Amino acid sequence: MAVKTVPSVKICGLQSVEVLKSIVHLPIAHIGFVFAPSKRQVTAEKAQELISYLKSEAMNGVPIPLTVGVFVNPSEEQLTQILAVAPLDVVQLHSKETPAFCRWVREQFHVKVFKSVSISKSDNRIPLLADVSAQLDPYIGTVDAVLLDTFDPIYGGGSGTSFAWDCIPVYQEWARKAQVQLLVAGGLQPDNVNELVSAYQPDGVDVSSGVETDGVKDIAKITAFVERVNRK
């Protein structure tokens, strides 16, 4: 019998050092900072403050998550300016960025690159592997992970709504052949994440609004989310 692996957890949209202090002890693999237009958008200086706190914890021997910057169609200049201030570990791209641009980001900043794939919440069709390969094969060798997220007409992702999970296995098959990680976002919350993990076993799960109360990160919800991802 195959051993089930526990997906990694990414908590996105962090804005507060105090929240970070309250969750740094949890088994969270990635912390996301949003630089794209959003109510969760942060400045490079704020991200640098949060990163500095994590680095101070690392010096004390605390295992810390990798830091992820979320961008939508950034320019080379924007990325250069932000990463000069906020030394991110991962750049997550959420729009129509080309394989050449992804490669440039990887090589220019020596970071990992996550590429978002937007899926319409109204589209219940299961794509063919050939279609997924045609879409994503050009990104092989330029990205470290593909992130499935629900399409948002304004921001690309981060809508807080879910898509039809039936399409996940096709992308999962592609990701395994391409030897990249497959992360799933879109409408996840403590009440449904264990269902997703049990049914599809993605490499990672990504949450933002699903662990908020009135638009603010909720420590109890984050804790519950992490616990349910790790539930056997």
Image: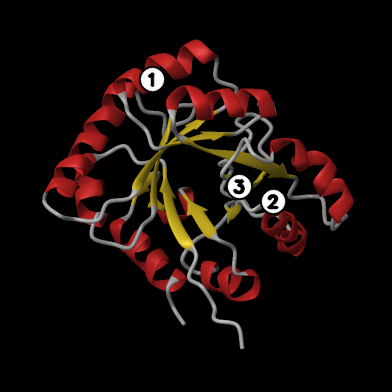
N-term-proximal mark, 1 vs 3: 1
Residue 203 location (% of width, % of height): 55, 61
Give the answer, above or below, for where 231 lies relative to 162: below
Residue 154 is left or right of residue 170, and the answer is left
Q: Which residue is mark 2?
A: 178
Residue 172 is left or right of residue 37, and the answer is right
**Callout 1 crowding tier (Cα within 10 Å): few <14, some 14–19, many ≥20:** some
Asked if residue 96 shows in the view, the reply is no
Q: Which residue is mark 1?
A: 82
Q: Nearer the viewer, residue 80 or 20?
A: 80
The amino acid on which the numbered mark 3 sits, given as a three-letter code, is Leu
Disc 2 and disc 3 in contact, CB within 8 angstroms:
no
N-term-proximal mark, 2 vs 3: 3
Q: Residue at x 44, y 52 (%)?
A: 10
Badge 3 marks a residue whose secondary structure is: strand
Give the answer, above or below, for where 208 lies relative to 70: below
CA separation, marks 1 and 2? 30 Å
Which residue is farthest left? 60
Asked if residue 99 shows in the view, the reply is yes
Residue 151 location (% of width, % of height): 68, 41
Q: Residue at x 19, y 45 (%)?
A: 18
Q: Nearer the viewer, residue 130 or 161?
A: 130
Residue 7 is left or right of residue 100, and the answer is left
Which residue is farthest bottom? 1
When asked about the image quadrant of residue 196, the answer is: bottom right
Q: Which residue is mark 3?
A: 147
Say which of marks 1 and 2 sits in front.
2
Residue 55 is left or right of residue 28, and the answer is left
Give the position of the N terminus as an image quadrant: bottom right
Disc 1 and disc 3 in contact, CB within 8 angstroms:
no
Give the answer, above or below, for where 39 lies relative to 197: above
